Image: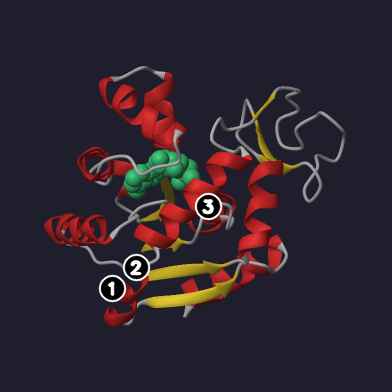
Amino acid sequence: MIIILFGPPGAGKGTQAQRIEKNHGLVQLSTGDMLRAAVAAKTHYGQKAQEKMQAGQLVSDDIVIGIIADRIKEDDCKNGFILDGFPRNVAQAKALDVMLSEEGVKLDAVVQMEVDDEALVDRISGRYTCANCNEGYHDTNLKPKVDGVCDVCGSTEFKRREDDNAETVGKRLKEYYAQTAPVLPYYAEKGILQQVDGMAAIDDVTAQINAVLSA
Ligand code: AMP
């Protein structure tokens, strides 16, 4: 199964993608995570992407399309994958169609996570992850069970994304509405767009997504 988790920054795509990965055996492909890894490793692509990411702008299509085209050819993607953060504009959506048809596979569903704008800023500015296993937390909505200790791996090291600050969040939301939201009609026309209520509790959102995937 191949699905896209679609929604603005802070909608919960990463959290839900991790859960789908565990429950359905699909691989999470997050272009944001891949780009952050490239930035940390100071690769050629990473250096080109870094400035745009810090400014809350989209990285060039060539880079992200190239990254996804290479990644979906790997063995672990053969059972299916969840795209998280890709495509982010119509050109990327069209490029994805070409890649998938070259691989002889098709997109099963695009799951749009609907969240109010006010909630997004709060979600993004309070979120952080375990530096070891990447489990996600939030300052007020999702604290670890024991203060300062990761529930999953016991690590006491946590990290915050550089672009999760109030100024950059505003720019990322603008980019979403200008460039990414126009992808929705593209998938609606294909009859594969489904909505879930991203404002619901995390477990409820997972249940809604599971219902879409088993339909
Ligand atoms: P994310 O982790 O999905 O919020 O992405 C973080 C940043 O990486 C974005 O603000 C963009 O600068 C960049 N990025 C991630 N995915 C894409 C994409 N598909 N196209 C262009 N830029 C992207």
Asked if residue 170 lies left or right of residue 58, the reply is right
Q: Nearer the viewer, residue 19 or 79?
A: 19
Is mark 2 in CB contact (under 8 Å) with mark 3? Answer: no
Position of residue 67 measured from the top left corner of the image (x, y, whole percent): 26, 39
Instruction: Give the structural element (helix, strand or loop) at label 3.
Output: loop
Q: Which of 166 and 24 is in front in this view?
A: 166
Q: Is residue 80 above or below residue 73?
A: below
Q: Quadrant of residue 60?
A: top left
Is the CB of the residue bearing disc 3 within 8 angstroms of ligand 1?
A: yes
Q: In this view, does 10 lie above or below 131?
A: below
Is mark 1 in CB contact (under 8 Å) with mark 2? Answer: yes
Q: Nearer the viewer, mark 1 or mark 2?
A: 2
Real-space CA distance between mark 2 and mark 3, rounded to the nearest whole angstrom: 15 Å
Q: What residue type is labelled 1?
A: Tyr
Q: Residue at x 24, y 45 (%)?
A: 61
Position of residue 160 measured from the top left corner of the image (x, y, whole percent): 63, 31
Real-space CA distance between mark 1 and mark 3, rounded to the nearest whole angstrom: 20 Å
Which residue is denoted by mark 1 in the rendering? 186
- Viewer can see residue 90: yes
Is the CB of the residue bearing disc 1 within 8 angstroms of ligand 1?
A: no
Which residue is denoted by mark 2 in the rendering? 182
Asked if residue 63 lies left or right of residue 202, the reply is left
The first of marks 2 and 3 along the sequence is 3
Q: Which of 137 and 118 is in front in this view?
A: 118
Q: Is residue 163 above or below residue 189?
A: above
Position of residue 158 measured from the top left corner of the image (x, y, whole percent): 69, 27
The first of marks 1 and 3 along the sequence is 3
Which residue is denoted by mark 3 in the rendering? 9
Q: Is residue 23 above or below residue 184?
A: above
Q: What residue type is labelled 3?
A: Pro
Q: Name the quadrant of the N terminus.
A: bottom left
Is the CB of the residue bearing disc 2 within 8 angstroms of ligand 1?
A: no
